[in-house]
Amino acid sequence: MKTSKAYIKRWLPNLLAGLLFTIALFSFWQVPALCAGNREYEAKQAWRVILPTIEVFWQEYQTAPAKLKDDAWPLISMLKNFIKAYPDSKMLPEAYYILGEAYASVSFWPEAEAHWKIVTRYFPNSKWTNQALTSLILYYERTNNQKKLRRFYREIMRRFPDSIAARTAEVFMARQALLRGNVQKARQVARQVSKASPTPEVDVPELLDLKARLALHDGKPKKAIEMWVRYLNLTRNPASRASTLFQIAETYRRMGDVLKARKYYALIRRDFKGQPEYLFARFRMLQLKEQAREQLARYTKGQVSMPDFYESEMVFQKILKEFPKHPLTREVKKEFVATELKKKDYLKALLLAEEYLREDPNSPYSKDILLMADQAKNYLLETSYDLDHLKRIVSSLKPYLTIHEDSQIYDFIRRVAHKKWVELQQELLAQKRPIHVLQEYWRFREFFNDSSALTKEAKSNAVKALLQADETFIANGNNLKLINFYLSNKSKIDRLGVPGHYLYLARAYANMGLDQASLRAYQKAWNSDPDHKLRCTILMEWTGQIVKAKRFKAAQDTITLMNLYCPEQSIGAKALLYKSKLALWQKDYRAGLNMALDSMNMKPEPESVKQALLSAIYLAEWNTVKKIYAKHSKLLKKQDKIKVLRTWGDEALNLGQPKEALKPYKALNNIEPDEPANKFRLNLALASGKRPSKAARIWTDASKEVEGLWNTVFKAEASFYKFMEKAGGTI
């Protein structure tokens, strides 16, 4: 019920006004023969009907702009009907002017501009002309359309040189000249307009604003305030009133009279919510509040509450969004940067400073913003951050590294990005995330190719990360992942030129059984100029892989390099083993035996034992073979034992020493009792040198222990000896 009453109360004046206006129009059209005087009387009556709605509009335009979304349209309709009904009325300039303001209140700017121009062009001497001109100029200033504004001034002065509109335009041009520093031009116009009529300040109230600004320039702030107060009494335009009140408040603030300044800011904040000055007043109130807080902090040694940064940022952002070209917005930008510094959000302060200086390098606050940007840069460089903050800094600064180097703070951004990017890599490395370190380094190199200490440090981090990744891959048995990672990033990794990486890569290939690829990786590791310690490791492993692949000609080269570059390692157990294998391949059995024995004496290993046994076997030094086998055979794997015993027995038998072959063959049969080939060898040794009858018996008895093909073979051997016995021969 309360809502309904409020609704009726709000809309009743508009309904009554509309009804009366319709009756007036109806009466007018019903009496077409009325004289001109009566028609003007009718117009005045119709205008009186609209006046209450106009007053409501002005009040809401000033204090409650949100309501105008609904309330402005009935007024627009009334004014359009009035203009249509009374095209010759003396109220027409005012109607057009208010119609422009009504359109402006709902952001129909082209329509507003058109109706204001009608006033200035068709009613140049009306008292509403300067109001319309003021609205037009404020509109052009807020949209920063200076070119259009100057063209409009020239048009007014050309078409109506002696009119109020022309004098008003002159005053506005003089105000612009004063803002540019041309005081002489402003004074000249003020004198000329003052002499143009007996009541210049009534005809052109904006003259008072110009004189107030000149007084302020001359160091007479009180006189300036007096003139602005007089101007307030002569203008109805909410934009002009708000602007003037703000000038008064600003003047009191500069005079140090904070109480009076706060009073005017509060008045603007209360009554002019639809004007830019509403936000600017809030901005100043926040500034004054912060100044008071800082002053109190000095007396209480910092024991005060923190400022409301959220409210400040909200006001700043709203001003920047809605009034980006307004002169005061430049100061707002400076304060925004200062606020972020107080919040210790140095990154945001730096980026805001870069944006503002790039957009407006000639701002009167450029030096202040540049100084704050320098402070933000220093704080960023000196402050330690965790991983998440480092990521935020780097990702935020990265896009700015592509801006033109003429930017005033490009060097600040580059220095911060340079250092924090390296710190990000270090933090990732400490957290054992080597792949991420490498990815960050490769992105880093897209922007930083200098030879500075930081860039060298970044490369050092990348090298450590690569080796850390390789080590992790190998330790976890992820040989294929290591290989795939290298192949996917081959060109980038090759530019790092890390010998240790190619060593790990060679190991991965070797573990996968890819001998040729492994050898190529060892070759690359050697060609990458490793240090002395790593060089010897590469040579040792490379030689081992070559020997394993039985490429003994290549092994000669690597062993020669080992003797040259790594003399101490070249006489170690492993090196001697490789040399022994090479000697064995070269059939230098004596050298092979000696080096194998030396290696075995340093560190008995299955390979060195096997190598010593084979060398001694080929030298037919059976006692040496027996000693080595008796002492170290337990180190050998089963298959290695089988190979050694088989070679031992075969060599002895080939040399016509069947007795020497018996021991290895018997041992071989003990290891593999079910292997017919071993039985065959043993019987060869047993029958060798025996008379045919005895040899035939040996093979006949042995044939009973085997089946199948081997049984046939054994019987064939027995038959052979039986034949020789009958023939009277000997073996």
Image (cartoon, rainbow, N blue to C red):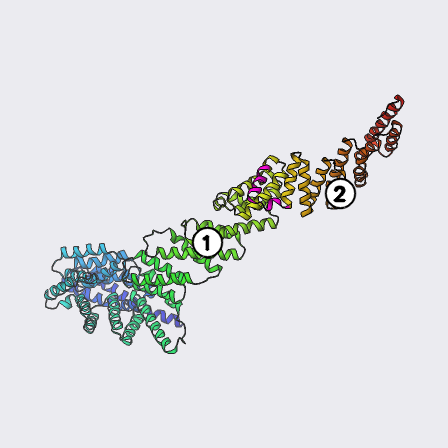
**Residue 503: horizontal and vertical position, in percent?**
56, 45
- Can residue 35 be seen here? no
The reply to whether discs 1 and 2 touch (Cβ–Cβ < 8 Å) is: no
Choose top left, top right, bottom left or bottom right for residue 663: top right
- Secondary element type, mark 1: helix
700 horizontally vs 119: left or right: right
570 horizontally vs 175: left or right: right
Give the dominant element type of the magenta stretch: helix, strand or loop. helix
495 horizontally vs 543: left or right: left
For this rendering, which residue is in front, 147 or 424? 424
* Residue 560 magenta-highlighted: yes
- Can residue 285 be seen here? yes
- For label 1, count other residues whose C-alpha is less than 10 Å away and answer few (under 14), some (14-19) or many (20+): some
**Residue 96: horizontal and vertical position, in percent?**
22, 60
Choose top left, top right, bottom left or bottom right for residue 221: bottom left
Spatial CA span between label 1 and label 2: 56 Å
For the residue marked with disc 1, what is the amino acid?
Glu
Tell me the quadrant of the picture where the C terminus can be found: top right
Residue of label 1:
457
Residue of label 2:
629
Q: Earlier in the sequence, mark 1 or mark 2?
A: 1
- As drawn, 611 above or below 290: above
Tell me the quadrant of the picture where the N terminus can be found: bottom left
**Residue 78: horizontal and vertical position, in percent?**
26, 62
- Secondary element type, mark 2: helix
Residue at image point 35% right, 61% down: 374
Which residues make up the magenta segment? 556-572
